[in-house]
Image (cartoon, rainbow, N blue to C red):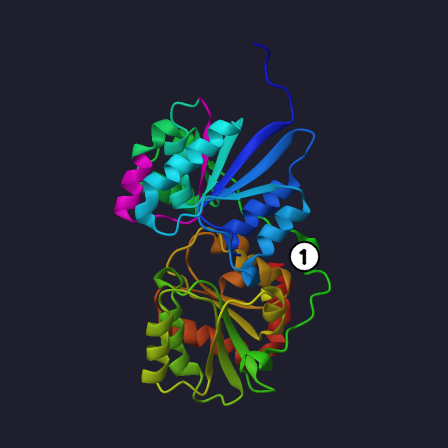
């Protein structure tokens, strides 16, 4: 039997294709492959995203990359996802599977069993959840390598997850500088921000990982004394209702504006006075890289990947996880001393 020749078919498997950090990196990788060497195809376990969130699918279509959505809506449909992905892979066997995110890692590895297809799984965050770590350990025999987005993620995967060091490879996240050319600041009044306000901005999923509740708690220290400052929270997620209740309980409804996911995150970052990243854990924050590239100052918690990205000057603006007082103090310092911003952002960039 002759050895296979290029272009080699590569199957990228992801949990979903709504815009997010991991999904953007998948699309950048698929679009950037040398087509003389590789033929990428993208498989999403979830249904196609809604039209207003279909940006990444459109980018793949423009590049001539085939996208197939398995259509699974709930985690309990695991076996359905495995069967359908396996059937699809058998129809057009790839030379390699590269998966992104936990559910895609598991489904991809199980679906490929017995098919002699090497699987490379992506570890995007520092996973300390015992059940997920146990599942990943049980899949070690089915996965050739785990690609970690930072040294911190690799350390957590080895120490807390019990994954063998020899299977862990670190490939940091990256961004395309061309995306940041000529980004005009967004008009944030369209989201409910009063004209003339300085904006402290959070963009991301609304769940416990992202620490938005800690940021809102910090806001009660830096907002009331500053009538010209608004905290803008942009994103969707299961924690939305609880966060709204927290804002109301702290009597911050006049200065905290919440908006759903928006299609122009870079323009919003460009319009912000300060970018806040209060995460409880991460891998390597894409929104942090975007803020740096757009020349915005950042206050971030001391989670995985942050110290890798910020300069020594930027390290001054890193705060302990879940420390709302420290978060408030650093945000206040940036709001009170705008003359220091240029030095910080240039060092970070």
For the N terminus, which image quadrant?
A: top right
Where does residue 71 sit, x and y in percent of width and height?
A: 44, 48
Where does residue 147 sit, x and y in percent of width and height?
A: 47, 38
For the C terminus, which image quadrant?
A: bottom right
Residue identifier under label 1: 179
Which quadrant of the figure has residue 343? Answer: bottom right
Q: Is mark 1 on a helix, strand or loop?
A: helix
Question: Which segment did they paint magenta?
Answer: 116-137
Which quadrant of the figure has residue 168? Answer: top left
Of residues 293 and 325, the one nearer the viewer is 293
Where does residue 283 sit, x and y in percent of width and height?
A: 44, 50
Judge whether residue 175 can be spotted in this image: no
Say whether residue 131 is magenta.
Answer: yes
Judge whether residue 54 can be spotted in this image: yes
Is 330 placed left or right of 127 in the picture?
Answer: right
Q: How many labels does the image show?
A: 1
Crowd band around label 1 with a 10 angstrom C-alpha radius: few (<14), some (14–19), many (20+): few
Of residues 152 and 148, the one nearer the viewer is 148
Where does residue 245 sit, x and y in percent of width and height?
A: 33, 79
Q: Is residue 320 above or below residue 36?
A: below
Is 31 placed left or right of 331 in the picture?
Answer: right
């Amino acid at each position: 039997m002759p050895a296979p020749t290029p272009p080699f078919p590569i199957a990228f498997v992801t949990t979903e294709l709504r815009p997010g950090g991991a999904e953007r990196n998948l699309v950048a990788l698929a679009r950037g492959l040398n087509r003389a060497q590789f033929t990428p195809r993208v498989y999403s376990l979830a249904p196609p995203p809604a039209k207003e969130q279909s940006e990444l699918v459109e980018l793949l279509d423009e590049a001539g990359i085939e996208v197939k959505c398995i259509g699974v809506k709930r985690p309990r449909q695991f076996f359905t996802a495995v069967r359908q992905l396996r059937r699809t892979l058998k129809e057009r066997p790839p030379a390699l599977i590269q998966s992104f995110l936990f559910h895609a890692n598991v489904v991809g590895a199980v679906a490929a069993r017995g098919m002699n297809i090497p699987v490379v799984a992506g570890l995007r965050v520092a996973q300390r959840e015992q059940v997920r770590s146990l599942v990943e350990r049980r899949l070690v025999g089915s996965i050739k390598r785990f690609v970690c987005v930072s040294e911190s993620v690799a350390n957590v995967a080895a120490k807390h997850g019990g994954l063998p060091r020899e299977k862990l490879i670190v490939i940091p996240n990256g961004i395309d500088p061309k995306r940041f050319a000529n980004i005009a600041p967004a008009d944030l009044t369209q989201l409910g921000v009063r004209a003339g306000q300085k904006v402290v901005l959070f963009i991301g999923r609304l769940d416990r990982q992202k620490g938005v509740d800690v940021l809102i708690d910090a806001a009660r220290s830096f907002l009331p004394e500053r009538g010209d400052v608004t905290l803008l929270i942009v994103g969707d997620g299961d924690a939305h209702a609880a966060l709204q209740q927290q804002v109301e309980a702290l009597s911050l409804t006049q200065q905290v504006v919440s908006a759903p996911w928006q299609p122009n995150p870079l323009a919003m970052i460009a319009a912000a006075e300060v970018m806040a990243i209060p995460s409880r854990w991460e891998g390597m924050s894409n929104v942090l890289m975007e803020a740096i590239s757009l020349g915005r100052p950042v206050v971030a918690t001391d989670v995985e990947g942050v110290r890798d990205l910020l300069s020594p000057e930027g390290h001054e603006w890193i705060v302990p996880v879940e420390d709302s007082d420290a978060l408030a103090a650093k945000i206040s310092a940036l709001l009170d001393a705008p003359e220091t911003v240029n030095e910080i952002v240039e060092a970070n960039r």
